[in-house]
């Protein structure tokens, strides 16, 4: 609707987080620009979960909101064969079950073989602040009022969801000396496998807490909360609750942690993470002023909740094309997800598959053992949603294979085969791959004498050797690292010092592969066994309604989802293992 709002971060100006950071790394490995733009505009970077294993490490960055938009504009406006048109779609054009284009509010008809809907929270969007209701897709922007009806008349099912955003605070009114400072990290980690290190100055975030007085004032406002007075009926995100939901759900808690996050290097605007709210404006302000650091609080705008339409994602294929309308693709919050990263992963898959369909090529689909994006889309189209879907590492059964450090190893070569990742990106990965394998080969073959290394082992708190061993066996020990051992092994140090580009990244990737090789191998074997079911295609082979040998619930779910493979069928809630065995027997016949 507004070219100046391309890449607008509707909620917090942050990219990544637990599992979300892995998605951004995957987008980058596939050839997308999200990681590059994030690094270019990052004002604070942190690697979350460093105290846990590498399968849990997740990059996150605060970004400069304004610079993020213009970095994207620069890329988009200089992308060959990409045209941008500022307008609003009124009608989806369909002929004989195939999408043929869109008709806009400016009376413009745009013809297309494929159309992708990525409307975010704008479809019949309704914002709530206390008892005040305002139509809108987000603050100060209009809602899209006709598109949902244009889509649902073709049999596609829609529902309503809710999300929210916190108050935005004027930094000049904050007593920063009464909060805990949270600095970022300045090591080699970043989002993109390409590009340079973060160029912008790194700013701190700040931590403070609510208190019983704050909670009491918030409780007084609950009768006017649209979440609790019946004004909002739709379901919100479970894992990003509003402050009023926290009060009701965790009534025994006397405080809740809040993060004050900068919106940019040249603005006084701050985002209050942890205080999403749709309470009346006066309640929000008065409650926050009971926190010592906010006693002189001034705000730019209050928090609000927003309700919007979404479409049942079980009506989609894994390519994100509709099963009901040929050529229609859906991506982002219109599929029932929440979060920039989940939307970006879907947008990439929908865009790639729309382009491939126009060229007559086979769809590009990622499996659950290939990427978090594959897990996300499989969950959506197989299980559906009854609340806004958010990605977590726990949703992936193969998360040791889906680490943030190996996204390029998993996806870049495959992406290059469909001309998505550039040849430059491919060569960058192949050079890195060669260095990693060189280190691994050396460590597998290099013998270490006990007399040489035992003094080092004792100083590092590791059990001394009784006899010599291969270097890889030492690296597998949790107390030891490649760099700590290289100090005492000249030949190994020479090998490492030969690496000129991305040394730290290559060392970390090699070390993770060697330390966790047993776990990685075991999980790969499990994934390969399941892959056999992924290769058994069943769509079009069964009339589920007349399969009396499987459960009634199984028949109903299989008919509704119409799974592509036997593995997908096994993941449908309500389809039992015995139902899968019946299908296997029938396939054998």
Image (spheres, rainbow, N blue to C red):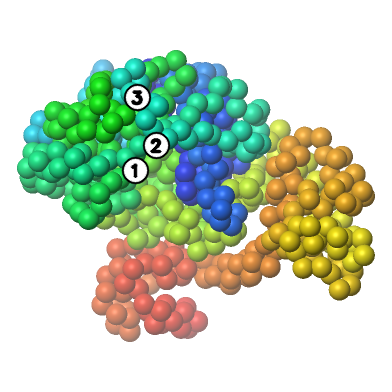
Q: Quadrant of the N terminus?
A: top left
Q: Are marks 1 and 3 in contact (CB under 8 Å)?
A: no
Q: Are marks 1 and 2 in contact (CB under 8 Å)?
A: yes
* Relative image position of residue 349 (x, y in whole percent): 48, 43
The crowd level at tag 3 (other Cα within 10 Å; few <14, some 14-19, many 20+) is: some
Dot placed on the residue nearer the N-terminal end, 1 or 3: 3
The crowd level at tag 2 (other Cα within 10 Å; few <14, some 14-19, many 20+) is: some
Determine which residue is flagged by label 2. Answer: 207
Q: CA distance from mark 1 to mark 3?
A: 17 Å
* Relative image position of residue 128 (x, y in whole percent): 16, 34
156 versus 423 height, above or below: below
20 versus 501 height, above or below: below
- Could you say which quadrant of the image residue 559 lies in? bottom left
Q: Nearer the viewer, residue 321 or 489?
A: 489
Q: Is residue 545 among what the camera can see?
A: no
* Relative image position of residue 105 (x, y in whole percent): 24, 21
Determine which residue is flagged by label 3. Answer: 175
Q: Is residue 561 left or right of residue 358?
A: left
SS class, disc 1: strand
Q: Is residue 507 left or right of residue 376?
A: right
Q: Residue at x 44, y 81 (%)?
A: 581
Dot placed on the residue nearer the N-terminal end, 2 or 3: 3
Q: Nearer the viewer, residue 361 or 95?
A: 361
SS class, disc 2: strand
SS class, disc 3: loop
Dot placed on the residue nearer the N-terminal end, 1 or 2: 2
Q: Which mark is residue 257?
A: 1
Q: Nearer the viewer, residue 484 or 533?
A: 484
Q: Nearer the viewer, residue 35 or 589?
A: 35
- Could you say which quadrant of the image residue 168 lies in? top left
């Amino acid at each position: 609707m507004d070219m100046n709002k391309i890449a607008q971060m509707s909620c917090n100006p942050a990219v990544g987080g637990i599992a979300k950071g892995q998605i951004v790394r995957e987008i980058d490995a596939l050839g997308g620009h999200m990681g590059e733009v994030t690094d270019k505009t990052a004002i604070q970077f942190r690697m979350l979960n460093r105290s846990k294993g590498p399968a849990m490490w997740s990059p996150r960055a605060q970004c400069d909101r304004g610079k993020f938009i213009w970095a994207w504009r620069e890329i988009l406006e200089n992308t060959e064969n990409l045209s941008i048109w500022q307008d609003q779609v009124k009608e989806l054009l369909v002929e004989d079950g195939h999408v043929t284009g869109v008709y806009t509010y400016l009376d413009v008809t745009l013809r297309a073989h494929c159309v992708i809907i990525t409307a975010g929270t704008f479809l019949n969007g309704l914002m709530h602040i206390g008892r005040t209701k305002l139509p809108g897709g987000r603050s100060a922007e209009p809602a899209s009022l006709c598109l949902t009806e244009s889509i649902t008349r073709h049999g596609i099912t829609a529902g309503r969801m809710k999300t929210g955003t916190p108050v935005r605070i004027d930094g000049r009114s904050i007593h920063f000396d009464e909060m805990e400072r949270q600095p970022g990290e300045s090591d080699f980690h970043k989002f993109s496998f390409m590009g340079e290190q973060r160029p912008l100055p790194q700013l701190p975030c700040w931590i403070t807490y609510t208190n019983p007085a704050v909670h009491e004032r918030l409780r007084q406002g609950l009768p006017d909360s649209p979440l609790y007075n019946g004004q909002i009926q739709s379901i919100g995100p479970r894992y990003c609750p509003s402050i009023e939901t926290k009060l009701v759900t965790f009534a025994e808690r006397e405080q809740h942690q809040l993060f004050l996050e900068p919106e940019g290097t040249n603005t006084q605007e701050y985002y209050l993470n942890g205080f999403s709210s749709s309470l009346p404006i006066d309640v929000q302000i008065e409650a926050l002023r009971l926190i010592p650091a906010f006693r002189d609080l001034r705000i730019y705008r209050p928090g609000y909740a927003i309700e919007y339409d979404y479409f049942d994602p079980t009506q989609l294929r894994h390519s994100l094309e509709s099963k009901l309308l040929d050529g229609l693709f859906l991506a982002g919050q219109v599929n029932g997800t929440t979060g920039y990263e989940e939307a970006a992963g879907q947008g990439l898959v929908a865009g790639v598959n729309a382009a491939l369909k126009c060229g007559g090529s086979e769809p590009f689909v990622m499996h659950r053992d290939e990427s978090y994006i594959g897990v996300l889309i499989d969950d959506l189209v197989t299980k559906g949603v009854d609340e806004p879907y958010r990605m977590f590492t726990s949703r992936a059964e193969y998360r040791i294979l889906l680490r943030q450090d190996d996204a390029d190893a998993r996806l870049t070569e495959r992406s290059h085969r469909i001309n998505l990742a550039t040849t430059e990106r491919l060569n960058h990965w192949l050079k890195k791959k060669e260095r990693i394998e060189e280190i691994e080969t050396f460590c597998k073959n290099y013998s270490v004498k006990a007399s040489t290394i035992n003094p080092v082992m004792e100083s590092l708190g590791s059990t001394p050797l009784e006899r010599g061993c291969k270097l890889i066996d030492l690296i597998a020990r949790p107390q030891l690292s490649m760099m700590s051992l290289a100090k005492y092994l000249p030949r190994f140090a020479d090998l490492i010092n030969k690496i000129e580009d991305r040394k730290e990244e290559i060392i970390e990737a090699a070390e993770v592969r060697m330390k966790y090789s047993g776990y990685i191998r075991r999980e790969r074997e499990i994934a390969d066994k399941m892959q056999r079911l992924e290769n058994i295609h069943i769509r079009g082979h069964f009339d589920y309604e007349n399969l009396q040998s499987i459960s009634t619930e199984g028949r109903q779910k299989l008919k509704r989802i119409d799974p592509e493979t036997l593995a997908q069928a096994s993941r449908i809630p309500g389809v039992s293992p015995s139902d899968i065995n019946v299908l296997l027997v029938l396939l054998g016949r």
